Amino acid sequence: MRAVLLSEPGSGATTFVGLFYVALTRLASERGDSFRFTAPPESLRRLSALYEPLVAGEFPGSLGPDAAAEIRFELAFSPPAAWRPFHRNTGFDPRFRVDCRWNGAGAASAARLLQGAPAPPGAVNDLLSCTAPIFLVDPRPTEGPGGSGPSTASDRDAAVVAVLTELARSGGTVPAPTTRHLHPIFVFTRLDGIPEEVAPSVPRGDPLDEDRLRTDGPRIGRELIDACLPRSRDLCRSRSERIDEPVSFFSYARPVPGAEGGTRHLQLRTLPNHRPEPVYPFTQFRSLIDHLGDLAQREP
């Protein structure tokens, strides 16, 4: 199965991908018999450049769309073997795989590629073969082109609708499989900057609370989708036989208190193996990775 992360510039995607790599390394260490991941050398170089500042308590530098396109990795899942006395299975037999790519040019650009716009070699195939599009969403209102226009939330919603519509089609301007079932995923970032008027029903309080997201996350995600992506929500519901109901997850790195106005440093914690990592919602990333594994298991 292929998953493609679709992000807009400035949406927090670089931090998300870095945290995803942090979570992958931690999960591979904890689940060595049932989960592993691999990446080509250039991807590892890019991922390491995101990982190193995060575990040192700094936000990583941004990456442009061309650099983002170089990042790709494969997740491999192997259900734990049944325990038998006097027998220990030391091999890893991957049963399900997820090939992950990153398109950092935005959903509108991806929609144009799927509609036949000129594209670099392989870019369209990466998108076309995707059945798990992951949309990174900064739910804060954003300025229009030039910084003077109205909120572009409706434009973003329209772009997501265009991507899902094109991916769900059979045939069209680009050859496609005869059948396609999509599993849309929304990852919300920058939760600490959402004005109340964007989603009044989302409870206030500390938005960067992992325990709260573990219990209330599904409801908060649905309310943010309703508020930020109503047309995308309606499309998924109206074409339920081709597009799953979207699921949502959350990404953040908790900053050191009182660091506003200057360089923002990140809070760190130490794992039982004495390795440092930023304070981020590991359970959200673990659930996202497990969700991708479950989808891969269901793929024909």
Image: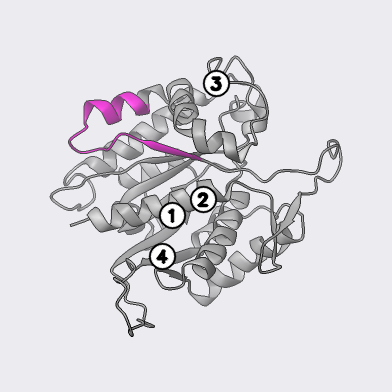
As rendered, which of 249 and 148 lies closer to the eye? 249
Q: Earlier in the sequence, mark 1 or mark 4?
A: 4
Q: CA distance from mark 1 to mark 4?
A: 8 Å
Q: CA distance from mark 1 to mark 3?
A: 25 Å
Q: Amino acid at mark 1?
A: Ile
Q: Earlier in the sequence, mark 3 or mark 2?
A: 3
Query: For numbered disc 3, what is the local secondary structure?
Result: loop
Q: Amino acid at mark 2?
A: Phe
- The answer to the question of whether label 2 and label 1 lie on touching residues, with beta carbons closer than 8 A, is yes
The magenta stretch is 232-249
Residue at figure coordinates x 29%, y 77% from the top left: 84
Residue at figure coordinates x 20%, y 41% from the top left: 169
Can you give x and y, in whole percent of width and height, for residue 133 in the image? 37, 46
Q: In this figure, which residue is indicated by the disc labeled 1?
A: 289
Q: Earlier in the sequence, mark 1 or mark 3?
A: 3
- Residue 202, which numbered label? 3
Residue at figure coordinates x 66%, y 69% from the top left: 273
As rendered, which of 133 and 254 lies closer to the eye? 254
- Judge whether 263 appears above or below 56 on screen: above
Can you give x and y, in whole percent of width and height, for residue 172 in the image? 19, 44
Q: In this figure, which residue is indicated by the disc labeled 2?
A: 285
Q: In this figure, which residue is indicated by the disc labeled 4?
A: 75
Q: Earlier in the sequence, mark 4 or mark 2?
A: 4
Q: Is residue 129 among the parts visible in the rendering?
A: no
